[in-house]
Image (spheres, helix red, strand yellow):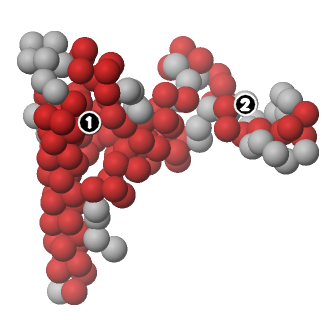
Amino acid sequence: MAWTRERVRDELVEAMNIIARAPDPVKSMLKAQPRHHIVRDANESYGYDDPARNLPPTDKDIEWAEERARWMRWLDAGTCKLVRLRALLKPWDFIKKADIPRHRSRGTLTKEVNAGLDKIVRRLNALEVHRQKKFKN
């Protein structure tokens, strides 16, 4: 399956969500605790809400998220910052304020974020083609 800008964006958003939920290294004892479904609300007990949504992610989830986060190393520092902020679902006003030295418009920032996502897409698709060629030989 070929990578698209939307797929990369969605996976980065999910990765940032997982990383944000990950416990601090100081709280590593939480990793050793069993992951039970904790009901905090009546809606959760009747199946309306997912009780596991606030639990720390599993080690497998964290590894998956870290692999996605490493994609952003392919970008220059400024673009990486903008892509990361968008993946964290920060509003555009917040991102415009974070673009300190330049104060660019939302349209320009959107173009830069999309260009960064496109660069990741091209790299992932190239890696996929390389993998397919490697397995054919």
The answer to whether 58 is drawn above or below residue 122 in the figure is above
Tell which tag, 1 or 2, sits nearer the viewer: 1
Q: Is residue 112 left or right of residue 98?
A: left
Taking the view exactly as shown, the residue that stands out farthest to the bottom is: 136
In the rendered image, the quadrant that contains the N terminus is: bottom left
Q: Is residue 56 visible?
A: yes
Q: Residue at x 82, y 45 (%)?
A: 48
Q: Which residue is mark 2?
A: 33
The amino acid type, in three-letter code, at marker 1 is: Val
Q: At which x and y percent is residue 115?
A: 14, 47
Element at label 2: loop
Q: Which mark is residue 83?
A: 1
The amino acid type, in three-letter code, at marker 2 is: Gln
Q: Residue at x 84, y 39 (%)?
A: 44
Q: Quadrant of residue 78?
A: top left
The answer to whether 66 is drawn above or below residue 28 in the figure is below
Q: Residue at x 13, y 34 (%)?
A: 108
